[in-house]
Amino acid sequence: MSIAEGILQVLEEQAVSQSFEKVKAVWVEIGPLATIEADALTFCFDAVIRGSLAEGASLHIIKMPGKAFCLQCLDTVPVTQRYDSCPVCGSYHLQITQGEEMRIKELEVA
C-alpha cells in the first residue's frame, strides 16, 4: 500500500511542476529483485487513486530482467532471485547490477 501511495505522491508533485490535471495511465518498471508483488501493487493502486487526479488511471507494469556481474568468471548473467548461482560457472559471488529497481517510466496525462 505504501508503494502505491508513494506513486500517487509522485504523480501529484509532477502535476504541480508540469501543469497537468489528470493522469490517464502510469507505466512502472519493476525488477524481479525489488520484492514487489505486481498483483498486490495493482490492487493497492486502484484503491489509493480513488478521489485523486489519477482516479480511473490504468497501471501498466513493465517487468525488467535481473542481471548480475559474476566476480568469479567475470561475466554478466541473468538472475531471477537473490542468492542465485552463476549459470555459467556456478559461483555465488554475484554483484547485482539490475533488477532491484522500481521506477515510474511513463505517464499519460491530460
Image (cartoon, helix red, strand yellow):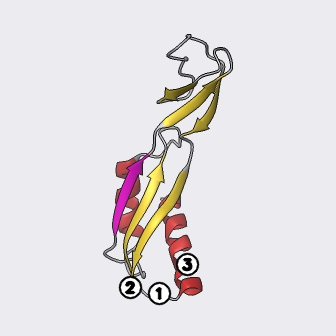
User: Looking at this rendering, what residue extends furthest in the right direction?
Assistant: 71
Marks 1/3 in contact by CB < 8 Å: the verdict is yes
Residue sitting at x 43%, y 71%: 107
Q: Quadrant of residue 94?
A: top right
Which mark identifies residue 20?
1
Q: Secondary structure of the magenta portion, mostly?
A: strand
Q: In the image, what residue type sits under mark 2?
A: Ala
Q: Which residues are magenta?
A: 58-63
Q: Secondary structure at mark 2?
A: loop
The CA distance from mark 3 to mark 2 is 12 Å
Q: Quadrant of residue 16?
A: bottom right
Indicate yes or no whether the magenta region holds residue 4.
Answer: no
Marks 1/2 in contact by CB < 8 Å: the verdict is yes
Q: Whole-percent x and y of residue 49?
A: 40, 73
- Binning the other alpha carbons within 10 Å of mark 3 as few (below 14), some (14 to 19) or many (20 upward) gives few
Which mark identifies residue 14?
3
Looking at the image, tell me whether mark 1 or mark 2 is earlier in sequence order: 1
Q: Secondary structure at mark 3?
A: helix
**Disc 2: which residue:** 110
Q: Report the quarter where the C terminus lies.
A: bottom left
Up-down relation of residue 93 to residue 59 (above or below) = above
Up-down relation of residue 68 to residue 42 (above or below) = above
